[in-house]
Amino acid sequence: MEIRYCYEQGEKFLVGWFEDYPEYSTQGVDIADLEQHLLEIYRWIQDGTLEVKQRHRVLKVAG
């Protein structure tokens, strides 16, 4: 299974969040550290420790 995430360079750390759960962000000193923290957040979402507040849908736009 794969889940997409976004990240950016902060002042001292990489800051990352899942595309599907942008309300929960975390940080890491490098990509491996960031991914470990993201996995922890994902586990918390799956086991109900963290509540998913946002929902996502796709809007079709005539073009």
Image (cartoon, rainbow, N blue to C red):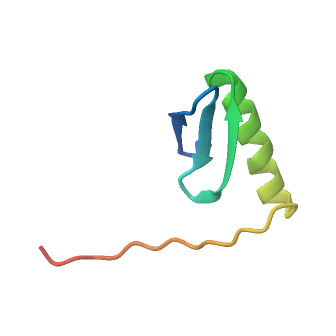
Q: Residue at x 34, y 76 (%)?
A: 59
Left/right placement of residue 41 relative to residue 57 reads right
Nearest to the observer: residue 25 or residue 45? 25
Left/right placement of residue 12 relative to residue 45 reads left
Nearest to the observer: residue 8 or residue 46? 8
Q: Residue at x 11, y 73 (%)?
A: 63
- Tell me the quarter of the picture where residue 37 sits: top right
Furthest residue to the front?
11
Residue 1 sits above or below residue 24 on the image: above
Residue 47 sits above or below residue 60 on the image: above
Residue 30 sits above or below residue 11 on the image: above
- Tell me the quarter of the picture where residue 52 sits: bottom right
Q: Residue at x 28, y 76 (%)?
A: 60
Q: Position of residue 18 (x, y in %)?
A: 59, 50
Q: How many marks?
A: 0
Left/right placement of residue 37 relative to residue 13 reads right
Residue 30 sits above or below residue 17 on the image: above
Left/right placement of residue 19 relative to residue 36 reads left
Q: Position of residue 4 (x, y in %)?
A: 53, 45
Q: Residue at x 83, y 53 (%)?
A: 44
**Which quadrant: the N terminus?**
top right
